Image: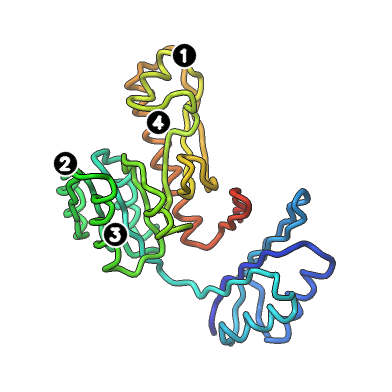
Amino acid sequence: MNTARVLIDCKDKKGLVYKISKVFYENDLNIVSNQEFVDKESKHFFMRSVVEGDFQKETLKSQLTLALGDGANIKVIEPAKKNIVIMATKEPHALGDILIRYIDGELDANILAVIANRENLKGLVERFNIPFIYINADNISREEHEKKILEELKKYKIDYIVLAKYMRILTPNFVKEYEGQIINIHHSFLPAFIGANPYKQAYERGVKIIGATAHFVTDDLDEGPIIAQDVIPVNHRFSWRDMQKAGRDVEKIVLARALKLVLEDRVFVFNNKTVVF
C-alpha cells in the first residue's frame, strides 16, 4: 500500500471536492486526511489530501487533471526525505537548532552540507558529521562569490536551501537558479530597524514586542511569501542583549516550524502569499 500527498489549487467552482473525491474513490484510495480552503477575494481553491492505496503516481495525476481541467495545479507526492543544504555565516543559534532536530529525527530531510562564508561554525557542523564548505567572500565581488557557491550546490540534488542567518544578500541571478526553494529567517517585527544590530536599535526605541518571520526568498529583500511567524513580549527591563537573546530563540523556533511545514508539503504559494495546512 502506497501513501501520497495530493496538492491541488485552481480557480474555485462548484463540484471540485466531489470530482476529486470521485477520482480517489474510483481508484479505491482511502482518504487519511483532507484540508481545503477557498480564497474568496481571488476565488481560488486549495486542497491538501493524504491518501493510501495502490496507485501509480502519474496515472492518478492524469485522472485528476482530466476531472478538473488543465488549469488546475496538481502535485502527487509520495512522502520521502527531502534534500537540503544550509547556508550560514557566524551566528550558531538557527543552524545549531536545525542540526539537533536533524540528529533527533525531527526533520524529514537529508542535510547534504553546510556552506558558509565564515569558518566560525566549522567545528559545530563537523560534530554532526555533515560536510562543512567554507567559501571565502573576502576581496571578491558578490557575483564571484555566488558563482563559487553555485558550483558547490550543483554537485547535489537539492530540494531546498535554508538560510540559517546567512548574512549576505543574494543576487537575482542566484535566486532565479533556486526560485521557490530558498527559505530565510529574519527579525520580522523590527521593520524600522535595518542594518547592524537591530536589537540595539529596538531597545533604544522601547519596542514592546520582538519576533521573527520565515519566508521564501525573492528578489524583494525580506518580502517573499511568509511561511511562519511568531512574536514575544518585551519591556523596559530588557537590555538590548536580553532582546537579542530572546529574539534568537524566536528565530530558531520559527525557522524550524517553517522548515517542518515545507518538508511535509503543507505550503501553497499564491500571489506572494502562502496557504499553510
Looking at the picture, does residue 13 appear above or below residue 69? Answer: above
Question: Residue 234 location, x and y as percent?
Answer: 47, 21
Q: Depth-wise, is mark 1 or mark 3 nearer the camera? A: 3
Residue at 16% x, 41% y: name it: 139
Residue named by callout 1 = 206
Q: Earlier in the sequence, mark 1 or mark 3?
A: 3
Q: Which residue is mark 3?
A: 150
Q: Residue 201 in the image: x percent, y percent? A: 39, 18
Residue 247, which numbered label?
Answer: 4
Asked whether, in this view, residue 147 is left or right of residue 20, the answer is left
Instruction: Compare marks 1 and 4 and give the one earlier in the sequence.
Output: 1
Frontmost of labels 3 and 4 is 3
Of residues 12 and 108, the one drawn nearer to the viewer in this rendering: 12
**Sequence-wise, which precedes: disc 3 or disc 4?**
3
In this rendering, the answer to whether 34 lies above or below 69 is: above
Measured in 3D between alpha carbons, the distance from the residue under mark 2 to the one under mark 3, in whole angstroms, is 18 Å
Q: Which residue is mark 2?
A: 139
Marks 1 and 3: CB-CB under 8 Å?
no
**Amino acid at the residue labelled 4:** Gly
Which mark is nearer the camera, 2 or 1? 2
Do the numbered discs 1 and 4 sit on residues whose CB atoms are within 8 Å? Answer: no
In the picture, residue 29 is in which quadrant? bottom right
Query: Which of 254 and 186 lies nearest the eye of the viewer?
Result: 186
Quarter placement of the N terminus: bottom right
> In 3D space, how far apart are the residues under numbered discs 2 and 1 (Cα atoms)?
38 Å
Q: How is the image coloured?
A: rainbow
Q: CA distance from mark 2 to mark 4?
A: 32 Å
In the picture, the quarter occupied by the C terminus is bottom right
Residue sitting nearer the eye, 147 or 185: 147
